[in-house]
Image: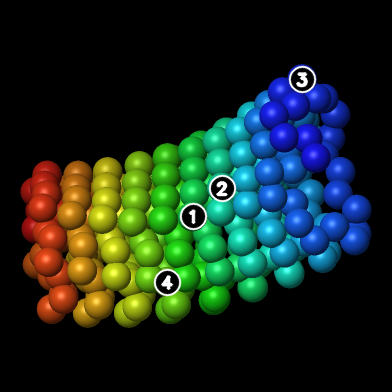
Amino acid sequence: AYYNCSNLTGAPVCGNSVVNMSNTYYYCKNLTGEPICGPNVTNMSNAYAVCWGITGNPACGEQVTNMANAYYGCRNLTGDPVCGSNVTVMDNTYNYCTNLTGNPVCGANVTTMDAAYIGCSNLTGNPVCGSKVTEFSWTYYGCTNLTASPVCGENVVNMFGTYQNCVNLTGVPVCGNNVVDMGMAYYGCTNLTGAPACGSSVTNMRYAYIQCTNL
């Protein structure tokens, strides 16, 4: 509806009967106010991608299943990330939302969260990974203020770059039994301790533990 309307101003709107918000406000960089999501929306892919001016908390209706790129580059969003209980796709959802705070979230039905929180440098608390997640690459890259131990769901297959430069993570690295690719998974995680992990299915460990000086 408003794809690439870069001069659009004011707050976003969404009627109660809307089911598809994909690309609705993509690159509407002059929108202000808080994002909204109607109660019947199922698809939020790219809904607010590159909406630099929106502020406040992200929104996600309970019917949403697809949040891919929903808030990509929304650098002025604050508050906690959200993820509805029916969401399955979280790829790039909060990519470079640098002012989000609080804990990352992952709904119980999420299967893919590639790059979901890349560059969310003000998130704190523990990383999360739902039990159904299979794609977990680059998920927390550059989340420099995450603390506690890394996690990896038992169904994860791809951990490429997952925790790269998460310098404040502590505890022992993990790797699920189904992980195939963990290249650069813990690159630069300088405060991890204990023994490196490598699941029985791993085929790629290239640079997995570079600069992990305390392992």
The Cα atoms of the two marked residues, 4 and 3, are separated by 38 Å
Is residue 100 in view from this perspective? no
Q: Which comes sooner in the sequence, label 1 or label 2?
A: 2
**Residue at which label 2 appears:** 69
Name the element at disc 2: loop
The Cα atoms of the two marked residues, 3 and 2, are separated by 21 Å
Residue 98 x/y as whole percent: 51, 37
> Looking at the picture, does residue 4 appear above or below residue 156?
above
Residue 18 x/y as whole percent: 85, 57
Res. 91 mark: 1
Crowding around mark 2 (Cα neighbors within 10 Å: few <14, some 14 to 19, many 20+) is many
**Residue at which label 3 appears:** 7
Is mark 1 in CB contact (under 8 Å) with mark 2?
A: yes
Is mark 4 in CB contact (under 8 Å) with mark 2?
A: no
The Cα atoms of the two marked residues, 1 and 2, are separated by 6 Å
- Residue type marked 3: Asn
Which quadrant of the rendered structure holds the N terminus?
Answer: top right
- Residue type marked 1: Asp
Residue 117 x/y as whole percent: 46, 49
Q: Which comes sooner in the sequence, label 4 or label 1?
A: 1
Name the element at disc 4: loop
Res. 139 mark: none
Name the element at disc 3: loop
Task: Using residue 33 as the reference point, say whether residue 16 is left or right of it.
Answer: right
Task: Using residue 77 as the reference point, say whether residue 197 is left or right of it.
Answer: left
